[in-house]
Image (tube, helix red, strand yellow):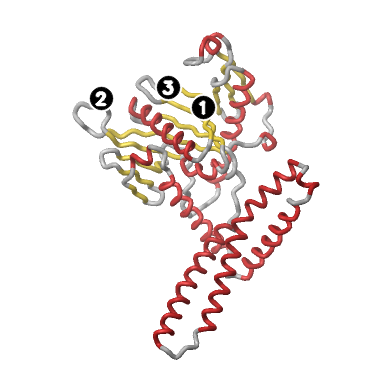
Amino acid sequence: MKSSILVKLKILVERHKKLQHLLSKPSIITNQHKFRTLSKEYSQLDEVVQCFQQYQSVQEELISIQQMDNEDDEDIRIMFEEEVRKTKAIIADLINRLKILLLPKELNDNCNCFLEIRAGAGGNESGIFAGDLFRMYSKFSEKRGWTLDIITCSESEHGGYKEIITKISGDGAYGMMKFESGGHRVQRIPETESQGRVHTSACTVVIMPEIPKSDFPEIKSSDLKFDAFRASGAGGQHVNTTDSAVRLTHLPTGIVVECQDERSQHKNKAKAMSVLVARIIRAQEIKRAEQVSNTRRDLLGSGDRSDRIRTYNYPQGRVSDHRINLTLYCLNEVMEGNLQSLIEPLIREYQTDQLASLSNEN
């Protein structure tokens, strides 16, 4: 292991010990904000420290084995060599894991996120597929213990949605979901298809982090157009007789957000503002990314319709992620919310790319 990494790890171990001491002090325990902040930092360091301690333990074990390897017996010598080989393989795995744990954490990974699904090409079948994707993400959120709240939706005439925007709240929601942005394509035989032909439809998924209010960019009131109108759809008399639904338009960018989920106009406006800020920041990030030359592939989808990231093929029961050339024959399980088999390989590949980038810089 590089000496620079060892130095950094030893500093983190010392910080971990200091935090452990601080968290036991009455003055910290009684200060809820301070205690919560330090507890979060302690928890984040815990995995790194435990992995490093395991590395040190196995490293000492290797030294002991090598010191014992002084036998003349051929069988014993072969046994020691095999033990050394296995131990070195464990050490290599631990070093790689430590490198990943030391990768810079992305600012918004622990944030809640917004999930937007829009029907694209394919007519009615596209709207139905949007509903299927929403159900898939709902089940995935439920399995992870996250909560999912609908902000606004426009239902399709034949089932599903023309558009649905939701907020997913939970620890690490954006960090886990951010790879879902992009074009999702479905290949299947619609119920209305009498000839048994396979149709192709598409939807667009966009994932955006929820930006804390303290980090909101400055938006001039003159740059915003506010409209109130009566909500449509389910919700009872109050929804249909009160101008509780809101529409916010950011004039410089033309970004429009509607929200009618809450009975209160004030709450709808707050939700719409949160989505609007997330969209503005995302648009700025995409623009910056386009200006920077990057020869490495980008696993974080743009959310553009032409950016096809995944295909769900029902006749063959397979799902393919085109960014990493991954094909799995477990479509039914995926549509029931078992997305880990798709997301985890993406995270590993993303981390590998980050490690490669850091190595090139060094």
Residue 30 picture location, percent across and down: 78, 42
Residue 79 picture location, percent across and down: 42, 80
Distance, label 2 to label 3, CA atoms, is 19 Å
Q: Secondary structure at mark 3?
A: strand
User: Along the polypeptide, which appears first: circle 2 or circle 1?
Assistant: 1
**Is residue 202 something one can see in this rendering?**
yes
The disc at residue 194 is none
Q: Secondary structure at mark 1?
A: strand
Tell me the quarter of the image containing the N terminus. bottom right
Q: Secondary structure at mark 2?
A: loop
User: Along the polypeptide, which appears first: circle 1 or circle 3?
Assistant: 1
Circle 3 sits on which residue?
A: 155
Tell me the quarter of the image containing the C terminus. bottom right
Residue projecting furthest to the right: 27
Distance, label 1 to label 3, CA atoms, is 12 Å
Circle 2 sits on which residue?
A: 192
Residue at image point 75% right, 44% down: 34
Query: Residue flagged by tag 2: what amino acid is it?
Result: Thr
Label 1 neighbour load within 10 Å: few <14, some 14-19, many 20+? some
Residue 136 picture location, percent across and down: 41, 35
Query: Residue flagged by tag 1: what amino acid is it?
Result: Ile
Residue 41 picture location, percent across and down: 67, 50
Near-viewer residue (357 or 49)? 49
Label 3 neighbour load within 10 Å: few <14, some 14-19, many 20+? some
- Establish if 243 lies above or below 164: above
On the image, which quarter does residue 246 sit in?
Answer: top right
